[in-house]
Image (cartoon, rainbow, N blue to C red):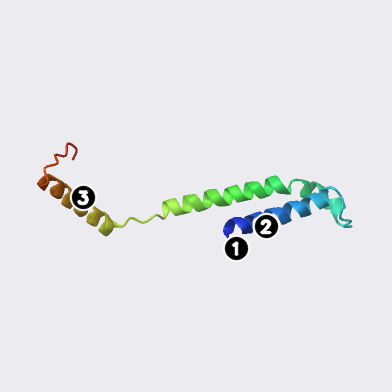
């Protein structure tokens, strides 16, 4: 099962239960006190998901590691390609 299917399954289950509780198709004795809380569950869930996504992006941005060895290897390959192009008669204007 792909991540998309997992998220869609969760969303369908969540919203079907939420709609059933809001429309009072389910007779739960404790829902009288929790009706106001249940009413605002989708915006709260959306806010929590957004907060989680922002936290993950910021964490991965701040802990991004540099690969100094790969950068040096790439620079060497660029210089090698420039020299190869110059031997073939192609003049590069940028450095």
Q: Which residue is mark 1?
A: 1
The one nearer the camera, 31 or 24, is 24
The one nearer the camera, 59 or 82, is 82
Q: Kindly report which numbered mark, 1 or 3, lies closer to the viewer in this rendering.
A: 1
In the rendered image, the residue lying farthest to the front is 88
Sooner in the amino-acid sequence: mark 2 or mark 3: 2
Q: Is residue 73 left or right of residue 66?
A: left
Query: Tag on residue 78?
Result: 3
The one nearer the camera, 13 or 21, is 13
Task: Find numbered disc 3 in the image and state the secondary structure of the residue it sits on.
Answer: helix
Please say if 41 is above or below 3. above
Give x and y (percent) for residue 64: 39, 54
Label 1, label 3: how far apart the Cα atoms are: 42 Å
What residue is drawn where x is 16% and y is 47%? 82
The one nearer the camera, 25 or 90, is 90
Q: Which residue is mark 2?
A: 9
Task: Find numbered disc 1 in the image and state the secondary structure of the residue it sits on.
Answer: loop
Count neighbours of disc 2 (C-alpha within 10 A) and say few if under 14, some if 14 to 19, many if 20 or more.
few
Give x and y (percent) for residue 95: 18, 40
Q: Is the C-beta separation of discs 2 and 1 under 8 Å?
A: yes
Q: Is the C-beta separation of discs 1 and 3 under 8 Å?
A: no
What residue is drawn where x is 42% and y is 52%? 62
Q: Is residue 14 left or right of residue 26?
A: left
Image quarter of the N terminus? bottom right
Label 2, label 1: how far apart the Cα atoms are: 10 Å
Query: Tag on residue 77?
Result: none
Q: Is residue 54 left or right of residue 87?
A: right
Task: Find numbered disc 2 in the image and state the secondary structure of the residue it sits on.
Answer: helix
Sooner in the amino-acid sequence: mark 2 or mark 1: 1
What residue is drawn where x is 53% and y is 51%? 55
């Amino acid at each position: 099962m792909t991540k998309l299917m997992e998220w869609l399954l969760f969303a369908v289950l969540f919203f079907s239960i939420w709609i059933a509780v809001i429309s009072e198709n389910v007779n739960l004795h404790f829902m009288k006190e929790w009706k106001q809380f249940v009413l605002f569950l989708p915006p709260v869930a959306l806010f929590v998901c957004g907060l989680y996504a922002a936290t993950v992006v910021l964490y991965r941005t701040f802990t991004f590691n540099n690969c100094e060895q790969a950068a040096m290897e790439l620079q060497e390959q660029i210089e090698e390609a420039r020299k190869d192009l110059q031997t073939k008669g192609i003049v590069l204007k940028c450095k």
